[in-house]
Image (cartoon, rainbow, N blue to C red):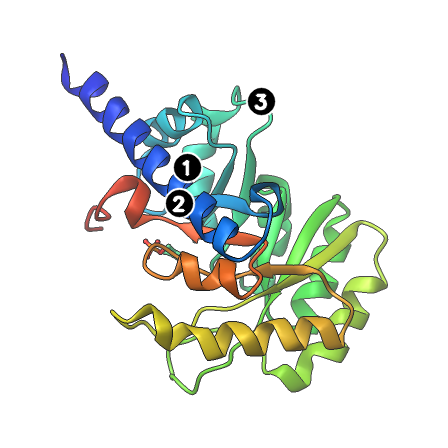
Amino acid sequence: MDSVLRETSAIRERVEAVESRIRRAAERAGRRREEITLIAVTKKFPAPVIREAYDAGLRHFGENYVQEFEQKSPELSDLSGAIFHLIGRLQSNKARRAAALFQSIDAVDSARLATRLAQAGRSLEVMIEVKLSDEETKSGAAPEQLPEIIEALNRSANLKLLGLMTMPPWSEDPEISRPYFRKLRELARRYGLTGLSMGMSHDLEVGIEEGATHVRVGTALFGRRPKE
Ligand SMILES: *Cc1c(COP(=O)(O)O)cnc(C)c1O
C-alpha cells in the first residue's frame, strides 16, 4: 500500500473510533446521535487531508485562521456539501474575507464583529464564543456582553444565530470541563439559544453529556498537528 492509501485508511479508522465515542456518549446521555454535529478540526493540515476526511464521510470542517484557509480553499471547491466553520478568533477587519470563505462563523466575540459580518451581506450561520475561564489566553466574549452581541446579530436577516461555543482551560482530566459546559448550557437557555459547541478530542463525552450539539475534534481524527 502506498503512503497516501495508508493515511486514508488511518483516517477512516479514526473517524470510526470518534463516531463510536460520540454514539456511546449520546446513548449514555439518552440523546440521539443526529443531535450532534462532528466538526473535524483541520487547522495546520494541508488540503489533501481535508479531502481524505471528506472521502471518509465527514462534512463539517473547522479552521482557525482566515489566511490559512484562504490558501487551502481553492483546492477544495469541488467538495460539494462540505460546510466550513471558522472556529478561531476573527478580527473585525477580516470579517468580509471570512464571510466569503466560510459557511459558519463559530467564534463571534463582539457586537462590532457581528456588525461587520452583517455588512458583508452573505448568508451565514454564527455562534458566539463565550469566555468562561479566567485564563489570559482564552478568547471569547464575557457573559455580560451577550445581550449586545445577540442584538447586533439579530439585526441582520443574513445572520442565523445558532448558539454558543466555549473552550475550557485545557486539562488531561475531562471532568475539569464539565462545570464550564454546564455554565454554557445555562447561558444558552437564558437567551433561548439551542446550539452548544463544546467538547474536543479529550472531553467530547463530557460535552455530549452536558448537551453539546457540536463537538470540535482535531487530534483524535488526524493525530498531532504538524508544526508551523
Ligand atoms: C484546535 C481546536 C480544537 C480541536 O482540538 P483537539 O484537542 O485537537 O481536538 C477545537 N476547538 C478549537 C477552538 C480549536 O482551536
Q: Which mark is residue 71?
A: 1
Q: Pinpoint residue 83: horizontal percent, then vertical percent.
A: 57, 37
Above/below status of 159 relative to 131: above
Query: What is the three-letter code of the residue carrying label 2?
Result: Glu
Pick the residue in front: 131 or 23.
Answer: 23
Closer to us: mark 1 or mark 3? Answer: 3
Name the residue type under label 3. Ser
Residue at mark 2 to residue at mark 1: CA–CA distance: 5 Å
Residue occupying the point 41% across, 73% down: 177
Measure the alpha-carbon separation of dots 1 and 3: 18 Å
First of labels 3, 2 by sequence position: 2
Helix, strand or loop at disc 3?
A: loop
Inspect this view and state whether residue 29 appears. Answer: yes
x, y (%) of residue 24?
Answer: 43, 47
**Can you tell which quarter of the image residue 46 is in?**
top left
Q: In the image, is residue 29 above or below residue 99? A: below
Please say if the residues under marks 2 and 1 sit with CB atoms less than 8 Å apart.
yes
* 184 vs 216: above or below: below
Tell me which label, 1 or 3, sits earlier in the chain: 1
Q: Nearer the viewer, residue 209 or 129?
A: 209
Read off the residue under disc 3: 80
Please give the name of the residue rendered at 35% of the width and 48% of the height, measured from the top-left corner: 218
Amino acid type shown at disc 1 = Gln
Left or right: residue 217 compared with residue 172:
right
